[in-house]
Amino acid sequence: MSLPSDIYSAFEDIVGPENISDKDYVMAAYRHAGPGAGGREKSPGPAAVLLPGSTEEVQAIIKLCNRRNIKYAALVSLFAAGRILQPGMIFLNLQRMNRILEINETDRYAVIEPGVRHVQLKPELMKRGLNYPTASVGPGGSVLANFIASGDHHMQHGASRVNRYLLSVEWVMPNGEVLKVGSIGNNAGWFCPDGPGPSLRGLIKGWNGWSGSFGIVTKVAIGLDVFRGPKIMPGEGHSPDFTVRFPLDRHKVHIFKFPGYDKLRDAMIEMGKAEIGFAVLKFFYATECALTTTSANEFFEVWNSGLYQRDLPFALWVYLATYSPEEMQYEERVMWDIVKEFDGQAVDESIRKKYDDNLDHMFVIVSNLQRVLRLGGGWAGTKLGGDSISQMFEVAKTIPEYINEFIEKKWIIDAPYNYQVVPMEYGHMAHIEMLSFFDVTQPGHPNVMMPLMQRSAETDVKHGFHTATPMAGNPAHGPLYSNFNLWVEKIKKAFAPMN
Amino acid sequence: MVNKPESSLELKYRLQAILQPDEISDRPEVLEKYTPDISGSKSRPFMVIYPGSKEEVQSVVKLAVESGTPLVPVSSGLPRFHDGALPEKGGIIVDFSHMNKIRQINIPDRYAWIEPGVTFGELVPELKKQGLKLVSPLLPRANKSVVASRLEREPVIIPKYQYDFIDPLLTLEVIYGTGEEFRTGSASGPGTLETLKADKVNPWGPGAVDYFRFISGAQGTMGLVTWAITKVEILPSMQKMYFIPHKDIKVLADVMNQLLRKRVVDECLALNNVNLASVLASSWPDDFKKLKKDLPPWTLIMCLAGYKRRPEERITVMEKYLHEICAGAGVKPLTELPGAAGMENLIPELLSGPCPGETYWKLRYKGACRDIFFLSTLSRAAEFTAVMQKAAGKHRYPKEDIGGYIQPMVQGRGCHCEFNFFYDENDKTGSEETGKLFSDASAALLNSGAFFSRPYGPWAKMVYARYPEQVAALKKLKGIFDPHNILNPGKLCF
Amino acid sequence: MESLKDFLYTMTSCNHCGQCKWLLGPKMRSWKYSEVCPIHLRYGFDAYSGQGLINIAQEILEGRLKYEGGLIELIYTCLTCGACDVNCKSIRDMEVLDTILALRAKCVEDGQGLLQHKEIAGKIDQTHNIYGKSHDKRFDWMPKKNKLSADSSVAYFAGCAAAYKYPEIAVNTLKILDASGIDYKVLGSEEYCCGTVLWRTGQTEAFRKAAEQNMAVFKKQGIKTLITSCAECYGTFRGGYPRFVDMDIEVLHITEVIQKALTESKLKLIKKQNLTVTYHDPCLLGRLSEKYVPWNGEIQAYGVHVPPKPWRRGTNGVYEAPREILKSIPGVKLVEMPRNAENSFCCGGGGGVPAVFPEFTKWAVMERLDEAAGTGATAVVSACPFCQENFKKTSNEVLKYFDITELVAKSL
């Protein structure tokens, strides 16, 4: 379904003829599914794609959409982009808006447009000894989209979800007007998201984001942390066998196995209380295997050896990153005190040593998360919730209640401990995610994403666990969650009455 | 608005049906407590209620909606420095001091679940007993509500534990202006509080909205909070204080920035000689005068900490970083408090809880104090100090009498700048001049890019007049959560 | 050779992660020069990328997409530089470039090939070179004094570009071979175009014919080792020929030969040249130069390839040899561009594009020259006459261009 010609012309006047297309073959690139579903499933695709180059163009497009009742969605990379569900919608691809507007080294923030990718911002910050929390999507992911749409990342033990690092925002509201949220709205710089008074930042993002369905964020400031690694990415060798080595006297990954959930949990909590470790997490074991091998065949060679199943179901990854060898030695001593107290042991050295050669397997910089898609392309994350470390392990204990039937039917890879619990803010909270791999390319392998989410949600509701899956999977769950759905509707009605 | 006695009488009867007898009062001497003279407000409350439960709050809100009666929430005791709790349009004071239960202290996951009436004076010692520490603002009043402090995004003195400006507030339960109950973040559900298996420490959401942010900085205009959960931290097993004297806050701001980048220090703040003297002086005015004279213009106060395991080793490592950073900045960290030798031992205790003594520290010098505070970045702290001094000069306020306090926030990515003007309420001319200075200096700072993120009293008008698009958005929010404008009307831009 | 339907697995398993467009993480250096796909960088829409082209391929295969105006142009704007392919393969078991090539073959099969490419095929058919010049003149470049070893099993394959347009490359190559003490011969009138442009424009049958013709000559002349000075010939012999013929011949690029000779001290580079250079990796010498090994297996559940597939991920491209050579030349300082080795940005000369979209080729080489100039180098060095064609057209006095054989020959 293409746009009426007068509307097309009006859009063309806004962005210029080079930056709009409704050609069927150009739309083909947007008709195929994103992660988790694979190319076997298709959507109607957009009626047109526009590449706006400025906030003003975005505003003009939204206003025209409102006048002519055209639905739109914004995207940058297509990795996590919501698929077009309604014929006649248009995509605003913001990739041309790709400037790094400011890097403030002293006050530790960067101001960026939506099209800036990790692979662009990271090296500029590394040169300056800075970094930002990065939800893992690979080098080509949009930094702004990460900050607006997702939250958790692997280095959050000594930091936090990206939510905390989202500072002032420039937002084109659903009515097409610009709202500058936080200190920038008061000509006071970009450093603060909240105020004056009640924080409008609450509209931009909660646990997750609006997936481009509630206005369009055109600029954000993000908080920066000190980067303890080298100034230049130390990648050597050639794809896919890169090494990324950091000095071992200041950067080291340890992996310990524990006798069960409770001791693993307690060791994790104690690491947080001791404030040691740059990253501490119970990591996905099958995902780890996928990340550190270079083909599906190699994955199964390692996986079928049984080593991971023996050593990693209750394993804790500890990445120590310090400013000096002395600090490293101190942290190592405290780490071992804790490990011993909770009956932990080092896992097989072959697993740990890979990190000496490529620390980015640990998601320290951008990593290569997409490797998990190699196992058939299907990827279903369930739980995706957050609360205390203790609660996250209680949630983890119930995973077999819904996962086993999928494993028995061979609809997902047999990896019942492929969940991660990643603490943040030195253990004040934690995130849980269960990751299941399914094959989107093989006939006879159903797309289990929705069924998995549904069964996971049922388990959570049954136990009273707070995770995000029920909300994501079924809007009818609203009444169970403080009727939040009704408030969302009111907010939408107030700010986006035309939707 | 219900301000007339005849309708208020009926309202009183209806409130009596909702509340316990000791939860309601309209005695003049009680009402007087909620209308301090300094406010200049002509409006007075006609009733004070002290609800004891969420259900009572809910019923009161519904009644207020029906009758169009303003509700003004109050959680802390006197004195109040900002007029967030003053009833601009009369109505009922909802005093939460009866809802003062510490519902839970959780050691492994480090949080406290508290009702709004719980004060720093109550919570700090309770936590200490369990080996925990409440990260607090500088010397809060003992009767200050912890929940109110968190909701107001007050700065805390250990910036390394703050990951954003709303931290360490986690989740909360709120009664909106519609009378509906809502729980934020991981407290939201599934199910009821009784069936929910969560520690309720995930502040975000539920879903794509951060509801707790709407309540923060709202001065009670968006909802009445009936409990909240705040982070607490481990009580260090070892501490070591360091001090850096300097005449230039720019140098100290840079040192604080460097230290917080590496998270070397726990407590970290800078006070000028006036404020530090006010805090330390035990006998007035002699002690104060001497200290004010002897103390350096600014003192950076820092604490290194070690925790349960190998505390000495941790402090050794951090000390090395401290000395490296200071050497780079050309300053020397001292273990003795310069200008007040021997008093350094008082500092850890002072920083660990509420303000001791009968008189609050800001009132000791002249009996009254006007505070100007705002947010900015450490790199601009010196610039604003200069703006402040210039404004004071115009009003002939003695430069050497201005209190100064720079509190890094959010690991040094921002800071709270505060200037205090001490005055004698009995000196009418002096009081008025201080009032004018307050207005002019606030305007000058605003024009220079100071961020008045918590716009109390006259600041609200100044701030919101400049940013109509933010006001429009806030009014939409207000229309959602308090559509009848019964919650603290007349505040902010509502 | 596989046809489009053989790449259904690639088409259906793409998750739009974007790695086909962006630099690999370990190689990131700066905000600028972070994109690897020339068509995506130039045109912006995602259809102009490896991901977009495999989506288009799938829809054409399934009959969902018609050959409307502009589609063929899009398909043939791609330089087939393989940056998308290698980057995708850093994380996935997919064949992006082979899918694009199979898509082009499908276009030709459906009568949608471009006239300009058909004309080149005609020239190759009739004159055995891409320029339509007389076959008799193919060896006019050959210095008369050169001694050839008629019985040698080693042959130097000059290729069309060196033979007709840049004879100095061929001449310098022979000088180097002589200096290295290598016995070799040339194929004389039996050297025909390698067929690279046919392969990369989807003219499969014509390419098969070229491969069979050349292979028959190699066999007849007893060739066991083929030396090329052209990256296109090199990559085509290694990556293209095994799809059609039994390619049991060792193929070496002159840079590999030089590196070996230097290592074995059979060649000495003596004369100093004061130059700061940056090296441009030609696509078919770098990331696309790995030998193709036919695989006829089955892709089972969860992506398991049975029997295991020998992947061409660009790991073992000829990256180090030219760099080692440049570092061995006295006075030469080598500086790297942000996009190098397997992430090298195409000069714009590949995939039959210059013949059809010269403006796009010009844009691509300008982008590359801008990147080269940013290194502080005064010259770009490469090892492919087709790259030379583009660079020489656009480089100027500030940034010179040298084929690596020229610098080596000057240093002998």
Image: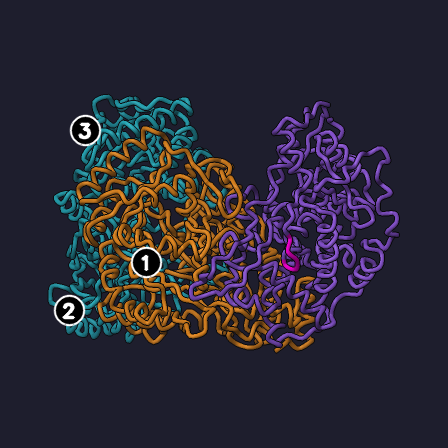
Circle 3 sits in a helix, a strand or a loop, which is it? loop
Q: Quadrant of residue B307?
A: top left
Amino acid type at image mark 1: Asn
Q: How far is disc 2 from disc 3 in space, using C-alphas?
A: 46 Å
Q: Does residue B475 lie above or below A181 as drawn?
A: below
Residue for badge 3? B283
The segment highlighted magenta reads: C243-247
Q: Quadrant of residue C240?
A: bottom right
Amino acid type at image mark 2: Leu
Query: Are callouts 2 and 1 both on one chain?
Result: no
Chain letter of the cyan region: B
Query: Are callouts 3 and 1 both on one chain?
Result: no
Chain letter of the orange region: A
Circle 2 sits in a helix, a strand or a loop, which is it? loop
Identify the colour of chain C in the image.
purple
Residue for badge 2? B19
Residue at 34%, 64% in the rendered image: A382
Disc 2 vs disc 1: which is toward the camera? 1
Chain on which label 1 sits? A
Amino acid type at image mark 3: Ser
Q: How far is disc 2 from disc 1 in space, using C-alphas?
A: 53 Å
